[in-house]
Amino acid sequence: MCSFGCLVDLKSALAWFVEDKETEKYLDGKLPIVECIDGSYLAVDLKKDSPTKGSIYACNPSITLTDKMVTTFDSILLFIKSVGECYKQRVYALDNGYFNIDFDKEYGIFKLFNPNSIYWLDDIERLMIFDGKDWKKFYMFRINILLWDRL
């Protein structure tokens, strides 16, 4: 368990993967491994010829403000190490039955362990990677937040 959700059981993940391959093709050769209650998820790239094979992608439009999947962890091993480090540093804690997260510490650990993943880049760095249309929307959203904070 981490801020992205809980592991998807293998049977459900494979069913989701096979169904998508035959219909929507949105996963594009990525196997869902973690799912959150808000519908966002993490998926590992399994495509043989992919330059990001083994990387983990996030589908989280409410955060990225795009429907594109974004690299979040450089590999499965670094995902496990990142989450493990969060537990080691007590970033995650159970408090009266609630799973509490220190999001600032988690962000720092995830960014440190996964330097090649787009998800952890600063807004301006990400701005240079995605196409203008999605990033205009994202940038305007960020400007509105900054202006709102100053009111």
Image (cartoon, rainbow, N blue to C red):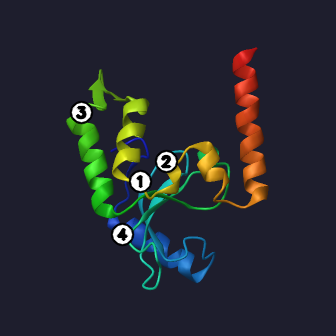
Residue sitting at x 47%, y 79%: 50
- In terms of sequence position, does the residue under pointer 2 or pointer 3 come before the other? 3
- Tell us which disc is closer to us: 3 or 1: 1
Q: Is residue 118 left or right of residue 75?
A: right
Q: Amino acid at mark 2?
A: Trp
Q: Amino acid at mark 3?
A: Gln
- In terms of sequence position, does the residue under pointer 3 or pointer 1 come before the other? 3
Give the position of the N terminus as an image quadrant.
top left
Q: Does 94 appear above or below 6?
A: above
Q: Is residue 48 left or right of residue 91?
A: right
Residue of label 4: 11
Along the viewing direction, whichever of 38 and 70 lies nearer the viewer: 70
Q: Does 115 appear above or below 86?
A: below
- What crowding class fits label 3: few (fewer than 14 Cα within 10 Å), some (14-19), or many (20 or more)? few
Residue of label 1: 115
Residue of label 3: 89
Q: Is residue 11 left or right of residue 32?
A: left
Along the viewing direction, whichever of 16 and 32 lies nearer the viewer: 32
